[in-house]
Amino acid sequence: MRLVILLSDMMIPAVMVYIVLYGARKKVDIYDAFVEGAEKGMKIVVTILPTLLGLMVAVGVLQNSGLLEILCRLASPAADKIGFPAEALPLTLMRLVSSSAATGLLLDIFAKYTPDSFIGRFVSVMMCCTETVFYTISVYFMSIKAKKSRYTLVGAMIANAAGVAASLIICKLCWG
Amino acid sequence: MLNYLWGGFILIGILCAAFTGRMHAVTTGVINNAKEAVTTCITMLGVLSMWTGFMNIADKSGLTENITKKMMPFLKWLFPDIPKGHKAFEHIGSNVAANILGLGWASTPAGIYAMEELDRLNGGKSGASDMMCDFMIFNMSSLQIISVNMIAYRSQYNSANPSEIIGAGLLATLASTLTSIFFIMLRRRFFKKR
């Protein structure tokens, strides 16, 4: 446990030290290079903002309209049948759209059931192996203005569903 | 596809709010989220630009090339259609490396650079190429080894053993990543190239 925390605290500083030392050894003008790169980053964020804004507006509707609850209530009988905790459904869906909204729901579950309950463990594992698919697809494809994402969404959803299923099976085996 | 989903979310959501009497909640929620998008971007402006700054040093010093070279056998196998020695490989390499280390906001710019290179390869066609779709699917299969945030949240909520989920998380991540690779291979086997 302490080793993991130590490693994670070391991660970002270690990456920085490595890059700076490597750059200095290869006689790159490191500060100039940093500033040049940072400028490119600013432009990227500017292109991300409209995409993020559009997505967050849709998330706002989804969260507050009761649609998410209705969708989850419709799906919960099927979820019960396969032993999927119904309380984790809103989080599983939200995870695809918005990282911050998903984190909010995750912490609600932790507060209500504790992280050491079965559902607490399940959502912990599930969050590790899934990704904000909608957000990522929109940001990446918007930045190059490709209109058709073709089979990307299908493939990403299948991989994510496999992650969710694997989380459930692994949690059942370990803590069920 | 995303256009329909986005429109669907908004239209069905508001219709739903009209029936459940939650119009007021939707109004405040939408406005708050619009504000949140901007505050997120302001934070991102700092952190993401910091990473693109460091990444530029790594690019210029040849470090990125070096790391990519180590991943090359795997990347070449996964993306055989990208010409040998193409710049896209370097960006894909740093994107994958940042994802594995869990540096989320460092992986985004690298991913976008990779998409720009792949777009150039695609000759400005409006639809995505197979390479783009495959890269995106692999990228979104979650590559992170240890979710540090998750451990922090668990300990914040008084878990007796916040890091007990690491092993299970790793296995589940492996499952989703292998599934994405499997999907890409099946796609290549059964669907024509574009």
Image (spheres, coloured by chain):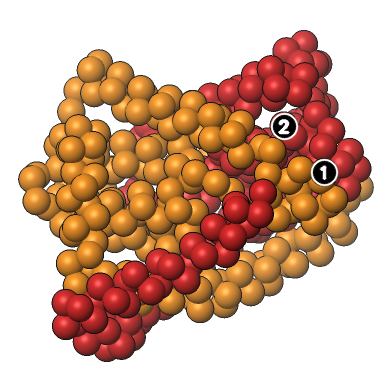
Chain colours: A red, B orange
Q: In this view, does A126 lie to the left or right of B110?
A: right
Q: Which of A154 and A16 is in front in this view?
A: A16
Looking at the image, which residue is at 82% across and 43% down? B160
Residue behind mark 1: B160
Residue A161, by quadrant, is top right
- Of helix, strand and loop, which one carries label 1? loop
* Total numbered badges shown on the rendered structure: 2
How far is mark 2 from mark 1, CA to CA?
15 Å
Q: What label sits on residue A122 in the rendered view? A: 2
Residue situated furthest top in the rendering: A81
- Of helix, strand and loop, which one carries label 2? helix
Q: Nearer the viewer, residue A23 or B74?
A: A23
Q: In this view, does B113 lie to the left or right of A154?
A: left
Q: What label sits on residue B13 in the rendered view? A: none
Residue B137, by quadrant, is top left
Looking at the image, which residue is at 25% across and 16% down? B190
Looking at the image, which residue is at 32% across and 71% down? A19
Q: Is residue A57 left or right of residue B20?
A: left
The amino acid marked with disc number 2 is: Phe
Q: Which chain is home to disc 1?
A: B
The amino acid marked with disc number 1 is: Ala
Q: Position of residue B33 (x, y in %)?
A: 70, 63
Q: Position of residue B6 (x, y in %)?
A: 57, 46
The answer to whether residue A154 of the structure is visible from this angle is: no
Q: How crowded is mark 2: few (under 14 residues within 10 Å), some or many (20 or more)?
A: many
Against B168, is B33 above or below? below
Q: Where is residue A31 in the image (x, y as percent from the top left)?
A: 30, 88
The answer to whether residue A115 of the structure is visible from this angle is: yes
